[in-house]
Image (cartoon, coloured by chain):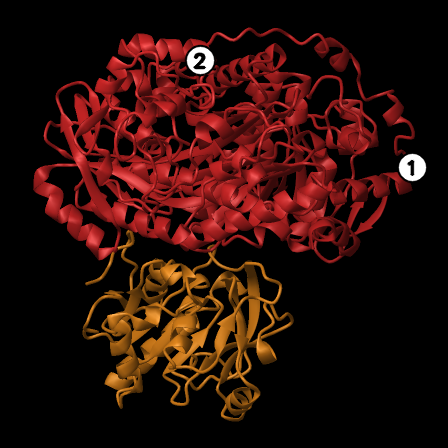
Chain colours: A red, B orange
Amino acid sequence: MTTSAETVGKKFNIDTVENAAKTPDTELPWAELGLKQNEFEEIIKVLGRRPTGAELAMYSVMWSEHCSYKSSKNHLRQFGEKVTDEMKKDMLVGIGENAGVTNLGDGWAVTFKIESHNSPSFVEPYQGAATGIGGIVRDIISMGARPVAVMDPLRFGAIDHPDTARVMHGAVAGIGGYGNSLGLPNIGGEMVFDSVYQGNPLVNALAVGVMRHEDIRLANASGKGNKVVLFGARTGGDGIGGASVLASESFDDTKPSKRPAVQVGDPFAEKVLIECCLELFKGSLVEGIQDLGAAGISCATSELASNGDGGMQVELTSVLLRDPTLTPGEILMSESQERMMAVVTPENVAAFEAVMDKWAVEYSWLGEVTDSGRLIITWEGEVIVDVDPRTVAHDGPVYDRPFARPAWQDSVQADTFTGSVQDAGRPSTSGELAAAVTELIASPNMCSKAWITKQYDRYVGGNTAMAFPDDAGVVRVDEESGLGVALATDANGRYTYLDPYQGAQLALAEAYRNVATSGAVPMAVSDCLNFGSPEDPDVMWQLAEAIRGLSDACMVLGVPVTGGNVSLYNQTGTVPIHPSPVVAVLGKLDDVARRTPSGWKEDGQAIYLLGTTAAELDGSEWSNLRGHLGGLPPKVDLSLERQLGEILINASRDGMIDTAHDLSEGGLAAALVESSLRYGVGARIALEELLERDGVDLFTALFSESQARAIVSVPRSEEVRFKDMCTARGFAHLRIGVVDAAGGTLEINGVDTLSLDALNEAYEGTLPKYFG
Amino acid sequence: MTELPLIGGAPVAVEPQLSGAKIGVVTFPGTLDDRDAARAVRLAGGTAVALWHGDTELGDVDAVVIPGGFSYGDYLRAGAISRFAPLMSKIIDAANSDAKLPVLGICNGFQILTESHLLPGSMIKNDHLKFLCRDQVLRVENNTTLWTSDYEAGQEITVPLKNQDGQYIADEKTLDALEAEGRVAFRYVGFNPNGSRRDIAGITNAAGNVVGLMPHPEHAVEPGFGPETNAGTDGLGFFTSVLNKIVGGAQ
C-alpha cells in the first residue's frame, strides 16, 4: 500500500516530519487503515500537524480495537478494581504487561495468558491457528519464563457444514504443527460446534510458563544510551494491518479477500528464539524485552519507550527485511512472526551478540534509549516519526459505547425448554433413557476429542502429570518437590447468550471447579472475551454484563484476573456469535503426584455425588440436541462452588478420593459415561435416593446441568472419613453407586444396561465420521 | 558439563556404581526431547552430559543419545541438515571405530542416524498424513544390542509414540537383510501407527552399538509422567542396558 503522502519524498518517496509540517492538506488514507474520522482528527490534535505516512501507520494499528481495547477499556477496569489485598497477595505482575505473573512459592513464579486468533484462523486456518500459538508463547517468553505447556479452546460452526471441515482440519493441524515443533505439551482445551460460529470460528490459545522470581522481565526501555535491538526472523510483508484491518472489523462478503493480512509462522525459528531468549535471561543480558505481535515494530517501540523512563531513537533502514521493497509504513505495521525487541546495555552488547551467534539468530541494532521523552524513527537519517510514545501506546481513544439490554432478551428468557415443542416426547422409559445417554455422548459437543488431541504431543518435556480428557491439565514445575500447576479453560456461549452476567460467572465457576477437581488450589484467572461488534448496543450490553459478572465472581472466589484479551467484531453481517467469554483458571498443586484423575480404576470403590440437582435444562446440551435455546441458564452459587472446591482439594490432599470428575455440560449422564470410558471400567449406579431428596425425575437427574456438582470415587477404607468431612462442612453428598471393574457395563437403575463397548463406539466414532 | 534442567532442577539420586558412566545428549537447533533424555539417563542411574551440535570434540562420554524433536525444523528432510553438524562426524567416526561407541537415536535422532548412514532405510510422512501421539506397544525383537540387553527377547513394552514422519521404508533387499541378520530391534504390535514396512519401529546396526527407533523410551521412565500401562516405566530398560554394559565393560 502506498500512501499518497509518500509520493512527495525520494527513493521510497519518504514522507518526513518536515514534509508533513509543510503540506498540511495532503490527503491521507486513514479510512483504508481502519481509522475513524474523529480518531484521525485526534491524531492531528496530538501532533499539532498532520501525521506522516509512517506515523499514520503506527497510530492506525495501535489505536485499533485489537491493540487499544478502546471499546472495552472502560469496562475492563473492573478487573483491576474488584480486587482485595488477599487476592493481590500472590500476584507478582498484574494486568498490563505481556502476561500476569503469580507466585507459586519456593521461589517459583508462573505466568499464563489466553488470547484469540479468531479472524486469521477463519481466513487461513492453518497459519492463523499456528501463529496464535506462536504469539501467546512469545508473550510468555517476554516475561522471562520458560514456556511449559499450551492449551487450545476451539469453537467451530455446525459439524455437518461443508466449511467446518476446512477450518477444523486447518486449525488443529496448525496448532499441532506449531506447538509440537516448539516442544510444548498440549494439555487441554475445548471443542464446541455451533452454527453461530460458522463464519467466525473461535481459535483461542493459552500458554503457561515458569520462572524463578529473580528472572521476571518487563517490557520497558530504560537507561539513556542503552541499545535497542531487533532479533529473530526478518521482517516481511505478511500480516500487514492484521490487527487493524482484520481483527477489528466484521467479515463482509462484499470486500476483497483478507488473506494477505494473515501472518505465516515458522515454528523452528520460534523454538530457537525461545532457547536463545532463555540464555539471554540466564546471563542477565537484557534490560527490557518485548515480543512483536499485533502491530509489530509500531507496538514494540512505542510500548517499550512508553513503559520506560525516556524516549527512543530508531533507524528504520537497519531493520533486516525479507522483502526490500517494503515501505517505512509497511515495515512499521508488518506482523511477521518470531521477532523480539530488546534493550541491552552497551557493556552487554558483545555477550548478547555471542548468544545470537550461538543460536544462529539474526539481529540488527536499531538505535538507542534517549531521555528526550520522544519516540523518533528515522529513515536514512531523516525523521519520519516524532511522537510522544504514550500517545501511541496508551493514550489512544476510549469509547463509552452505548449499550442496552436487547429487546429480545425477555422473550428468549421466557422460552423455557420444559414444555416447549422441542421437549415433546421426553425420554422416560428405561429403553428411551439408555438411547438418550448414548445420543448425548455421541453428540458433536460431548463426544471424544481424541481425533484432535492425538495430533498433539502431550509428553514432551516429561512434566505432564495430566492432560485431556481429564478435567484439568497438570504440569510439574519442580522435579524435586513435585510442585506444579493445573489449568482449565471453559466457556458456554449458550448460557452467556441467555444471561451474559451469569454466563460469564458460569464459565469461571466451571474452570474453577475443573481445577479444584484435579486437586489444585485455584489461584489466578486469564480471560479471552470473544464477542460481536461493540458498535451494536445489544452486543455491547453482553460484553458489559459479562465483564461485570466475571469481575464480581472473581471477587467472591478470591481469584484475580492477571491478564487476557478481548476479541470483538466476531460477527458475519449483523449476526454476532454467542457471547463467548473463555475463562482460564490456574491452580497450584504442592505435589502433582496427588493430582486426581477422572477415570475409575479400582473395583468396589464407592461413587459419591457431591451437590444437589435441580430441574435445570435450559441452555443444556440436551436442549441443544433438540434444537432449543431459551430460558435461564443454571443458577450460579459461588459460595457453594468454593465449598465444593475445598472438599475436592482436601480430599485429594488427604488421599480420601481416588478419582473425581466435575459435572457440567451433559450433566450426570456425561460424567458417568466419561469416568467409565476413561479406562474401560464401569459402575453400578442407583439414583432413587437422589430423586427423592432433590425432587426430580430420572431424566432430570441425568441430564440437568445444575452447577457445583462433582462425582468422586472413594476407597472403602476412606468412606467414613470422607462422609464425615462432607457432613462437617454441611455439603450435600450421596452415595450413588459402586465401581464395577468386571462387568464391562454402566448400569443405572431405571435405564437399560449400557455396554461400555457400545458406549465407546458411540463416543469415539463421531469426529472420525465427519473428519476422517 | 552436566546441564541442569531449566525447569525442575533436582539432581536425582543415582546408583553409585552407575553414576560414573557418562551419557552424552546432543542438542541441535530445534531439538525438543533433550532434557527428557537427560532425565532418563539420570533416572537410570547415569550421568547426563549436554553436548552441542557445533562442538568439535565428543569429550569423554561413554555413550550418546540423539534425542527427538524437529532439528532445523525438519526442513529439506527430517535429519538431513543435522547430519552435517560438526559433532555428528565425531559420533559417526566413534560409532564405526573399534571402540564402538553406543549411540541411540530416538525419533528425530533415528532420522539423523539414517541420514548419517549409520543405519539403513529412511522415514517418510505417516501414511495417514497426520501427526500422531499415542501410547504404543512394541515387541523387543533383538535383546542383544547394547541398548536392549535388559529386556527379554520378545518382551512387549509400551512407550509413547509422537511424530509426523514415522513411516519406516527401505528397499526389499535391505528389509530382507535386516530380518535375516536379526537387526529389526523393535516391531509395532497390534497397530501399525504410520505404515512402516514390516511393522518396523526400530533397528540396530550389525555390531549392536547403534540403535534407532521412532517411539520415545525416554518418555516412559517415571511413574505418572508416561503411559498408563505397566507403571509407565517400560522405557527405562534402554538406559539401564547401556549403563550396565558400560560399567560392566569397565570392570
Give the spatial CA distance, label 2 vs label 1: 50 Å
Q: Secondary structure at mark 2?
A: helix
Q: The numbered mark 2 sits on a residue in which chain?
A: A
Judging by the rendered image, the residue that carries numbered circle 2 is A78
The kind of residue tagged 1 is: Thr
Q: The numbered mark 1 sits on a residue in which chain?
A: A
**Nearer to me, B207 or A485:** B207
* Residue A723 badge: none
**Nearer to me, A479 or A197:** A197
**Nearer to me, B46 or A438:** A438
Task: Tell me residue A749's x, y (percent).
Answer: 83, 41
Q: Secondary structure at mark 1?
A: loop
Task: Tell me residue A132's x, y (percent).
Answer: 47, 39
Q: Who's the residue at 25% across and 72% down the image?
A: B87
Q: Is residue A145 visible?
A: no
The kind of residue tagged 2 is: Gln
Relative to A77, residue B116 above or below: below
Mark 2: give few (<14), some (14-19) or many (20+) Cα within 10 Å.
some
Residue A229, picture quadrant = top left
Task: Tell me residue A709's x, y (percent).
Answer: 64, 30
* Residue A429 badge: 1
Task: Tell me residue A573's x, y (percent).
Answer: 65, 23
Q: Is residue A420 left or right of residue A103?
A: right
The first of marks 2 and 1 along the sequence is 2
